[in-house]
Image (spheres, grey):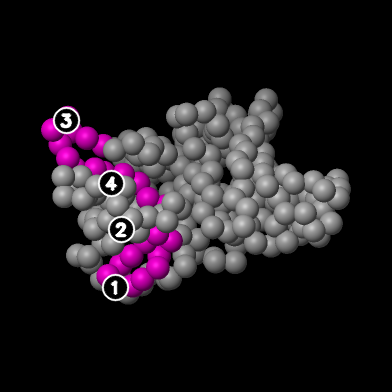
Amino acid sequence: MKQMKFLLVALMTVLMGMSVTSCMNGDDNTIYTGPAFAKCTNYFPATFELANGQKLVVNELSMPNLNIGEIYFFYYQFDTAQQPGNSQTLDVTLYAGSTPTSISAKSTEGPEKAADYNEATAPLYTFNSDTSTQPGILFDQYLVIPIMYWVKVESTDEKQKEELNKHSFILTYDFTNVKSGDTTLELTLNHVIKDGSEETVDRNKYTSTYKAYNLTTAISAFKTASGGTEPTKIKVNAKTNSSKNSLDGAANSTWSETLKTN
């Protein structure tokens, strides 16, 4: 039962968290339910700003533990019969059981210079660029990445937490070959597992998480390497294997997006 619960949570995260469509119970239902990656802009009323500038105001709840400027993930609802979905500001409620969870707890966390210690030791489950998933969301100076990866399903919550804490997702850059005038900011997403022992761990199920990376330092380093040229495109590479948790036979997957320019 514990394993099934864990897998169902993972599956719901994949299906809901990577979808931008509303969850309707029928054609006559005017209640929109959707996921949000949003920046906190106010404590009370709790206010969040989406990447497109739209504001979500959660009036029914005071959240003193929020940190202004951090990126949060949550599910929200509103009635489309009472306010248009394209309104600049929406009064929303949190979806049952959902609470805003920071995905940028370390506001200075960003890409690191590539090195032996932060090179991938395991693949991601998938990192596609088709219409069924969205590998990245550009949000101001942040790149938000939904990450699917292989894990071991444990028998208790405590052991499961220990397992999840062994996984790190490190975004790195290597601008050695960048030349003057280059405009593509290329990064690599590395899945690093630290088991702390020589024991072979059977990771045969997958789950997902979200990470927000601050691109400020990487963009500055890129401009230094390119002679001051602003990047106009971002490209992220990752090793993926949807068959097993092994770099043997892993594919080279890529996601790219045009960067907004000032």
Q: Secondary structure at mark 3?
A: loop
Q: Nearer the viewer, mark 3 or mark 2?
A: 2
Look at mark 4 in the image and give the residue it sits on: 85
Quarter placement of the C terminus: bottom right
Pointer 3 and pointer 2: residues touching (CB < 8 Å)? no
What amino acid type is highlighted by mark number 3? Gly
Pointer 4: residues within 10 angstroms few (<14), some, or many (20+)? some
| Residue 34 percent location from the top left of the image | 31, 44
Which residue is at a point 45% across and 53% down the rendered structure image?
51
Q: Which residues are magenta?
A: 23-49
Q: In this image, 9 relative to 255: left or right?
A: left
Q: Secondary structure at mark 1?
A: loop
What amino acid type is highlighted by mark number 4? Gly
In magenta segment, residue 66:
no
CA separation, marks 1 and 3?
A: 34 Å
Label 1 or label 2, whichever comes before in sequence order: 1
Which residue is at a point 59% across and 66% down the rendered structure image?
108
Q: Which mark is residue 44?
A: 1
Look at mark 2 in the image and give the residue it sits on: 89
Label 3 or label 4, whichever comes before in sequence order: 3
